[in-house]
Amino acid sequence: MRSKPTFLESALFVALVLLVAAIGWPLFSHYKRLSRRSEVPENLKKIFEGATLFNDRALLQIRSGRPSPHFPSSSRITPSIHCCDKGRSQPCVPGGHTATSYSLREWESVTWKALRFQLRDPHLFRYRFLKGADGISFTAEALGDLNCDGKSSRFWRRGKLQGDRVVPELTLHATPE
């Protein structure tokens, strides 16, 4: 038969649990923050690819004698709502029925259609396409207020036309949270 654990054994067990929690909590928090940002690189890549395809179609029109812009016009931030509810970050739900839901029609603007970009799954970031004043550059942006403190994290990726090719900047830029 087993005897009851002694006070020393119980204290060691509690100390071990606290030590594991002290080490694990910062790691958990770090990976949670990373996972909340995981949608951004893929979505900015899709917007970039959409701008590249738009330019390719524009070049075909230009070669056939019709003037055409190299990139679509700038968009508004989409969705127009913040992905926050009662001070907590919540996914924006396209076409859903929650406090952070919005109409899928927001993705039907001329710019998003031209880029062939639309989000149908819940997401934490809002997106914007900015055409450069020079007409041969653009910036794809993702904005997210993951703490719902009124300060948005901003990620962006830029591209510029060089000859007939769209050349990307090699990095994904971010502002600190």
Image (cartoon, rainbow, N blue to C red):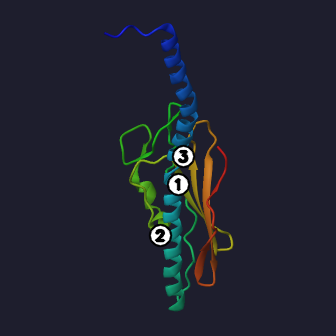
- Of mark 3 and mark 2, the one earlier in the sequence is 3
Q: State how far apart marks 1 and 2 are (Cα).
A: 20 Å
Q: Quick one: which residue is furthest to the front in this view? A: 1
Circle 3 packing at 10 Å, graded few (<14), some (14-19), many (20+), is few
Determine if residue 78 is in view.
Answer: no
Up-down relation of residue 12 to residue 21 (above or below): above
Disc 1 versus disc 3: nearer the observer: 3
SS assignment at label 2? helix
Query: What amino acid does circle 3 point to?
Result: Leu
Residue 40's disc number: 1
Q: Residue at x 52, y 64 (%)?
A: 45
Residue under numbered circle 3: 34
Question: On the rendered image, what quadrant is the N terminus found in?
Answer: top left
Residue, disc 2: 114
- Type of amino acid under label 1: Val
Label whose residue precedes the other's in the sequence (1 or 2): 1
Tell me: residue 162, above or below residue 51. below
